[in-house]
Amino acid sequence: MTTAQRPPTDHPLGDWQGLSPLSVWADTAVGALFIVPAAIVGTVVLIVLDLPWWALAPLPGALALIGGLTALDMTVLKAVSYRVTDERMEMRSGVLAKTYRSVPRERVRSVDVAAPVYARPFGLCIVTVGTGEQVGSESDQVKLQFVTAAQGERLRRELLYRDPPTAVGAEGADGAEGAADADGLELARLDRRWFAYAPATTATLGIGIGAVAALIGANAQSEGWIHRWISERTGLPGSAEIGAFVMARLLFVVPAALFGLLLSGTVVLVAVAVETWWDYRLTRESNGTVVMRRGLLNSQSLTIEGRRLNGVTLHEPLVLRAVGGADVRAVATGLGAADAEKTQAKSRLCPPMPRARARELAADLMRTPESPLDLPLTAHPRAALRRRLVRAGWASLAGFAVAAGLAWLHTLAAAAWWDAAHEIEERLNPLPVATHLVEAAPPWGWWLLGAAFAAVAFWYAVGSHRALGHGLHPRYLVVRQGMAVRDTVTLERSAVIGWRITRTPFQRRAGLAHVSATTASGKGMYTAADVGLGQGLAWAGLAVPDLLSQFLERDGGERPEDPRARG
């Protein structure tokens, strides 16, 4: 398409452009979706309360509020403009307080294009440009909400392709995207069988428990009034009758309750996974840029410039690892967010999948003949195991002390104490069985709980030590650690900008240290924990020669000669 043939919506490079006018109506539709039903409910409540004149107010008030918000959005829309030049991306915003921001294009690290479900009917998307800064929750981003899908695709190409961009009009947006897909290399595509890994998390049981806890909490806030009100109108038995029924059939009720909690958690997590990862596709374009597209209702596209991808993380939480699953996360600049949790979520490049497929995808992303993840890792000294066993021992002693205290209180509890506890629980909990179970249990049962806690603590300590490892690849350094969440990180040696050596007094006695590689990518620091001091320093020295050697001393106290000081 020549310049004369461009549609009116296509602006030349460097011209100031505004957000899409349709964004006002998208915001209006979202506001109406929440405000109008609330007004209808308010009207019904006022009619039920026999206040007919007041019932005429909610709907007109809601419409007036929607109109006011729409007018405000129109005012804000006119105040926001942006442009992309050969050197910079600039943005102006603000009605009362004017804001101007200018970002050099060389500092652009990622472009995230998201299309929420309420914006998709209008053909709109949100474009978030990441710069890699970490000084504030919003300072690392330039956010345009909303632009058309064609504008979003054009921005992605202009900001991440260093060559002069080709204009993409509204009619050519889909064609351009298809061409990019045709030229790109597909690294991964959704396999629906991967959804089976979605419930493999500790949150599966927690979701059901959280829902039950929320209901019990609401009932407790009303001192049992909610349960009594429902029981009176539905003919349900009272709390005491329910508690007696459960206690009489405990061996059936407990497994059934656990199954129900697991089932509810599974349904929720699979539904979330389907919405998040539907239509997932990961591709590498001809210039090395990695593009991930996903989403059922909320469509998202994340673009990472190839030279900013400095490694990957093989992420294996305990439950997912137990069923042979893993996922892959990017170690790249420009993916920082307001907090660590959001940063981890943004760096995910795939859904949970079989471990072998995840390792294959990680190797494809690193583009190495031999995957660093296949490298045999060096184990850490037995002193590191002793440190973890000592911690487990102290935790076990604390657990036995708590168990002894509870067992002693259990033997002192009189019948009057239990009656008072039962009465309090019946007011708060519609299923009052907790105090009955504690009363029926023998005092030595607390010691069994303490022993179980100690067994788990020592098992965790041994597993944590076995997870420790580090290695060196011709292009990457590799570190692994974690028991509850095991991460194997590969980081390009050229991306390491420094080393940090930390030693506590206990580590010095054991001859151990934390050796951390600092980088501008990912978390910013990746640590080989509790490694032998000489072992860790040798690893760091080989990974990035000359970066650490000037700070080391030879045996006898002499510093090694700096090769740059010769001749």
Image (cartoon, helix red, strand yellow):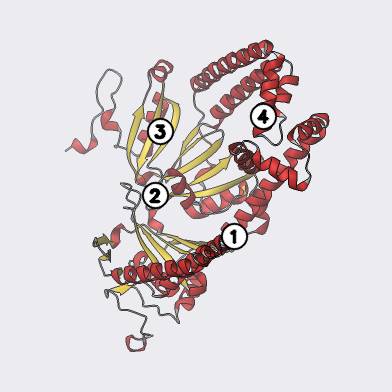
Q: Secondary structure at mark 1?
A: loop
How would you rate the neighbour count of disc 3 (Cα within 10 Å): few for under 14, some for 14-19, many for 20 or more? some
User: Amino acid under label 2?
Assistant: Gly
User: Amino acid under label 4?
Assistant: Glu
Q: Nearer the viewer, mark 1 or mark 4?
A: 1
Q: Secondary structure at mark 3?
A: helix
Position of the C terminus, as image quadrant, is: top left
Which badge, 4 or 2, comes first in the chain's sequence?
Answer: 2
Q: Secondary structure at mark 2?
A: loop
Toward the viewer: 468 or 522?
Answer: 522
Q: Residue 265: x percent and y percent?
A: 66, 46
Q: Residue at x 57, y 51 (%)?
A: 360
User: Amino acid under label 3?
Assistant: Trp
Residue 117 in sight here:
no
Q: Is residue 468 left or right of residue 98?
A: right
Q: Which mark, by number, is residue 539? A: 3
Figure check: 172 above or below 273: below
Q: Is residue 199 left or right of residue 78?
A: right
Q: Residue 29: x percent and y percent?
A: 49, 69
User: Amino acid under label 1?
Assistant: Asp
Q: Is residue 549 left or right of residue 194?
A: left
Toward the viewer: 45 or 72?
Answer: 45
Identify residue for label 2.
336
Toward the viewer: 333 or 207?
Answer: 207
Residue 7 in sight here:
yes
Position of the N terminus, as image quadrant, is: bottom left
Identify residue for label 1.
50
Q: Nearer the viewer, mark 3 or mark 1?
A: 1
Identify residue for label 4.
425
Q: Secondary structure at mark 4?
A: helix
